[in-house]
Image: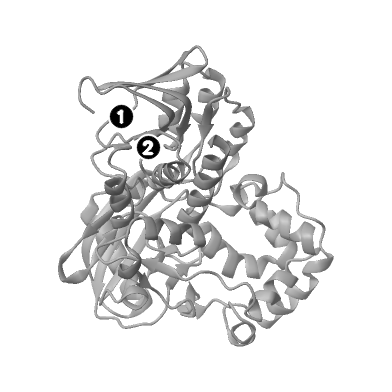
Amino acid sequence: MSADASRDVDVAVVGAGITGLALTHALAERGVPSVALEATDEAGGVIDSKPLDDGLVAERGPNRIRLTEGVERLVDAAGLRDDLLVADDDLPLYVYAGGRLREVPFDLSTLVRTDLLPWHAKLRLLAEPIADDVRSDESVGHAVRRLVGETTYRNLVEPIFGGTYGSDPDRMPVEHALPALRRLRAEHGSLLPPLFRRLRGAGETPPPVSLPGGLQRLPTALADRYDDRVRLGTPATGIERDGDRYVVSTPDGRVTADDVVLTVPAPAAADLLDGVAPTSAAALGELTYNPLAIVTMYSDARREGFGYQVRRTESLRTLGVSWHHSLFGRTGQYTAFLGGMADGRIVEMDPEDVGEIAAEEFEVVMDAAAHVRDVAQMTDALPAYDESWAALDRVSLPDGLTLATNYTARVGVPGRVREAERVADDLA
């Protein structure tokens, strides 16, 4: 924006991450005048890619995206359909447990043969339908233990689910962290029917995708397409009520809008809402995030698969490793994730020391040396979905203000795109 670049629009979108850009696209398609305000000079938010030498890419945020219908529409809008790198969704995923990699069962034959779950744990799954219903006030950890037993929880659910969010499932209320658990139980009376439908190949998930040069090419291309609606380097500094409308202040001008949609992290949203919705702002300020370190490495290891998660009882600080080598043809690239709720100090360490830990632990698991290419450390990387999420019960915004975020709905790019489309429908 220039110094006199005040705007009058129907919708002001705060943030040009993937949610804000998906919303911008959806509003444009519905003919709704809007402007998106992004504080930084780059679009993308948590999608942050850094191309390296030799075709490697440091993905400092999401490492891949599921090609759902909503994501597919965005890819087409960005003109990137022909550039998509599509991974084989049948590749195995592993858990490092008991000193070796063990395959995660995604089909019946793998369930039978995998040594990740001993036979007593596999037989324990048959008792799941007679367990009590899942309660919204219990933790994911407690619910899963009741449903499938301690061994399956420790060997499978805790490293996969807890490792993905960097959280402790025992501190993640079902209501906020995994509401689908209650829904599936309520619809089927058991988790086994939807499980076995998947084992028979029904309802297959969309494939994981990426882009040459990194995932950030998607938000960058969307921001370029809608350069008349997206203002980079233009932070929103305040929101005020002006009769039935809102005024969003920026260093370069004022945006007047009927509706304001905030797509930014909770601390930033709390600051902006303090003057118009102080109770909600205070509640958002209570939400906690988990720290994360992402280490991009090169190795001569040549394994095929999605990668691995690490069982929490192992003596490693690594949460998991994604194998870009086999997923997207980035020869020799592996990305390690460290930190989370139980290891917050990892982001306070010297980056070289973090890289050294990642490389040493990679060699322990993969029996191959790794060379660190990039280290990114983020204090507030992942919504914790812990007990602090109860504060959302106190969030009630005035008409015309909307939160479209990964802490009020689902995390993950497909979920962000779905919410953006839903919000656009409501506003249109």
Residue 23: x percent and y percent? 45, 43
Question: Which numbered disc covers residue 225?
Answer: none
Question: Which numbered disc covers residue 235?
Answer: 1
Quarter where residue 329 is shown: bottom left
Q: Earlier in the sequence, mark 1 or mark 2?
A: 2
Counting other residues with Cα less than 10 Å from the Cα at mark 2, is it few (<14), some (14-19), or many (20 or more)?
many
Residue 179: x percent and y percent? 66, 51
Q: Is residue 188 left or right of residue 276?
A: right
Counting other residues with Cα less than 10 Å from the Cα at mark 1, is it few (<14), some (14-19), or many (20 or more)?
many
The amino acid sitting under disc 1 is: Pro
Disc 2 target residue: 15
Q: Is residue 300 above or below residue 33?
A: below
- Of 148 and 9, nearer the camera is 9
> Circle 1 — which element?
loop
Is residue 253 visible in the rendered structure shown here?
yes
> Circle 2 — which element?
loop
